[in-house]
Image: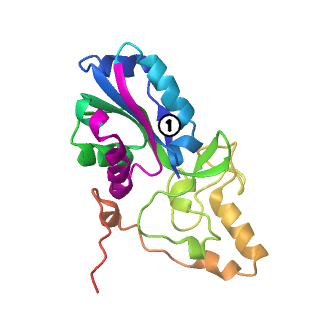
Amino acid sequence: MIVTRKKDPLVIKELTKPFKKLIIVGCSECAAVCQTGGSEQVKEMAALLAGHEITATISIESPCDKRVSARDFRRIEEELAAADALVVLACGSGAQAVSEVTEKPVITALDTRFLGMVERLGRFYERCSQCGNCILNDTAALCPITLCPRGIRNGPCECIDGTRCDVYPDRDCVWHTIYEKLKQSGRPDLYTLFHEPTDWLQSHTPREELWEKK
């Protein structure tokens, strides 16, 4: 899930000053879970921008999917044509998809933080850096690139007592946790495997994943 955070309301008000007529666009998936772009947040944004003419509000299931955005915007064609700009409560990918589909100025109301794991409402944790060199099969499904502050792919650094993180002493060393989990599952030999340095060329942006037609 993409974790987002609300921008300062004063920033939003300043960014929308040049525009009279606005559409507010929410995200019914990730941003809704984060309570940054769900239906309630769309209502809050409409109240914040009450000095403008809000021609429509819409919550899109997956704004980052151009097909879904295009389909939903067809339902408000007249309002879209009349709008000067769109205020988008979605991640950066969603905001850009909306911009491409509508060809209207877009004001992004959220800051995109990270690809997150949800523990419960309001508790989101980064667990994957999307490096394109996944070694989870060898590390008990724990990503050392993300969970180790130094991003070490092969064993721990000089931890304080062998179990705590050298950078953040209040946290467990992820490599210690990896070893314990591997040992519990009867696979401690995986701990000694050598992993080649991360090929950061695979994570140079912008990235694409294009399927070949069969």
Q: Residue 64's spot in the image, x, y percent?
A: 38, 52
In the rendered view, tell whether residue 144 sits above or below residue 161: below
Q: Is residue 98 left or right of residue 129?
A: left
Whether residue 58 is situated above or below residue 196 in the rendered picture: above
Q: Disc 1 residue type?
A: Gly
Q: Secondary structure at mark 1?
A: loop
Res 13 → quadrant: top left
Taking the spot 53% from the left edge, 68% from the top edge, the residue there is 154
**Residue at figure coordinates x 74%, y 68% from the top left:** 180
Return the residue found at the far right. 184
Residue 150 highlighted magenta (yes or no)? no
Q: Which residue is most to the top?
A: 51
The residue carrying mark 1 is 37
Q: Nearer the viewer, residue 16 or 69?
A: 69
Judge left or right: residue 133 versus residue 163. left
Q: Position of residue 93 (x, y in %)?
A: 36, 48
Tell me the quadrant of the picture where the C terminus can be found: bottom left
Residue drawn where x is 29% and y is 72% of the image: 210
Decide if residue 94 is on the left or right side of residue 158: left
What is the total number of numbered labels drawn onto the structure image? 1
61 in magenta: yes
Crowding at label 1, few (<14), some or many (≥20) Cα neighbours within 10 Å?
many
Quadrant hosting residue 107: top left
Residue located farthest toward the left when viewing the structure as drawn = 103
Q: Position of residue 74 (x, y in %)?
A: 32, 47
Indicate how the structure is coloured in the image.
Answer: rainbow
The range drawn in magenta is: 53-79
Residue nearer the viewer, 208 or 60: 60
* Residue 10 screen position, x and y as percent: 41, 16
Q: Give the residue displayed 75% in from the left and 75% down from the top.
A: 183
Residue 194 as seen in the image, left or right of residue 118: left
